[in-house]
Amino acid sequence: MVSTIPARQVTKHPMNAPSPNTPRALEGASAWIITDGKAGMLVQARGVADALGLDYLEKVVQPKALWAALAPFGPVGPSERLGRPGSDFAPPWPDVVIATGRASIPYVRAIRRKAGPRTYTIVLQDPKTGANTADLIWVPEHDRRRGANVITTPTAPHSFSQKRLAALRASPAEDIAALAGPRITVVLGGKNGVYKFTEADDDRLQESLSSLAQLGASFMITSSRRTHKRLIAAAEAATREAPRILWTGEGNNPYPGFLASADALIVTADSVNMCGEACATGRPVYIFTPSGGSAKFTRFHEALAASGAVRALPDRFTTLVSWDYSPLDAAVSIAAEIEQRYARRSRMVPGLSRST
């Protein structure tokens, strides 16, 4: 089963992309984004598509039980009729396909075979099916996959371009603007297969936030679907006497404004996406690391520390330290590499042209 979302109006010239006077290889090109609809996957794919200036449709795939179990190694189910008239995946083929997530991999492989070189195929994250899965594969630096068609960045792509963050800062929501500085954004993740978040961990975060409150900080706190109640309670108790906004899932999500308006950010270590988005702000980022961890996450956080963007969250603050670094924007870096490779291939393949 496939659901197709109408084309989005996309930002053609992000602030940190080439200027509007610079010819861009894929600006306005047609594209499909193929995912299983998970928010984290959509965020990464949209970030790259927007940085490229693509005109794209989002196709959410939900293979039936057998075909879902066989993904990413198996084929697309025959009921999809991929490539045939009336299918959700049929000509005219787009100029670009961006796919991410296990369920999407059979589709991008099949499209690559049927569409041929005129459709440039991109997979975000390791497809597990080898280098021939797509024309280009992006993985984060902490992943072990490497190859001639593999590119890496320290953080994952996202949609928080410098232009978008600047616009959010220029027009903050009233409740955010009312908070006195320093404004601290607290981004709470939660338990996963790597991090445990013990009660002692929750208490440790509470103590750190309490010490910041005693220094006169204001807080913008947001939770995720994985955030357990005790962690929310710890953040609530620590900041109860301080000016704050606490969002736990009701109403419009203020997360973009929280990112843009922060003087500093505290992020739990369990989410690559959340840590990377915080580092797009150029503001100091403190990482709270709960019990657990893995070699892959260790490599990721070591890379962020090496970039100068992050420091470990102190158990107790006596002062709030500030530091500068160049904002990390993987979407722009990935888009620049895709443009170069696409332009190079276009010169090498006679008769290759876009559909737009």
Image (cartoon, helix red, strand yellow):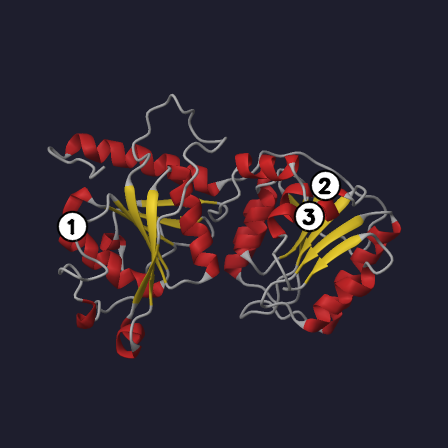
**Residue 19 location (% of width, % of height):** 43, 24
> Does the residue at mark 1 contact the one at mark 2 (Cβ under 8 Å)?
no
| Residue at 26% across, 53% down | 131
Name the residue that disc number 2 marks.
263
Secondary structure type for disc 1:
helix
Secondary structure type for disc 3:
strand
Q: Which is more N-terminal, label 3 or label 1?
A: 1
Amino acid type for the residue under numbered disc 2: Asp
Q: CA distance from mark 1 to mark 2?
A: 48 Å
> Does the residue at mark 3 contact the one at mark 2 (Cβ under 8 Å)?
no
Name the residue that disc number 3 marks.
265
| Residue at 76% across, 62% down | 235
Name the residue that disc number 1 marks.
115
| Residue at 72% across, 41% down | 263
**Residue 154 location (% of width, % of height):** 49, 45
In the picture, the disc for residue 311 is none
Q: CA distance from mark 1 to mark 3?
A: 45 Å
* Label 3 environment density (alpha carbons within 10 Å; few <14, some 14–19, many ≥20): many
Q: CA distance from mark 3 to mark 2?
A: 7 Å
Q: Is residue 254 above or below residue 320?
A: below
Amino acid type for the residue under numbered disc 3: Leu
* Label 1 environment density (alpha carbons within 10 Å; few <14, some 14–19, many ≥20): some
Quadrant location of the N terminus? bottom left
Q: Which is more N-terminal, label 2 or label 1?
A: 1
Amino acid type for the residue under numbered disc 1: Ala
Pick out the residue farthest to the left: 350
Q: Is residue 201 visible?
A: no
Circle nearer the viewer, 1 or 3: 1
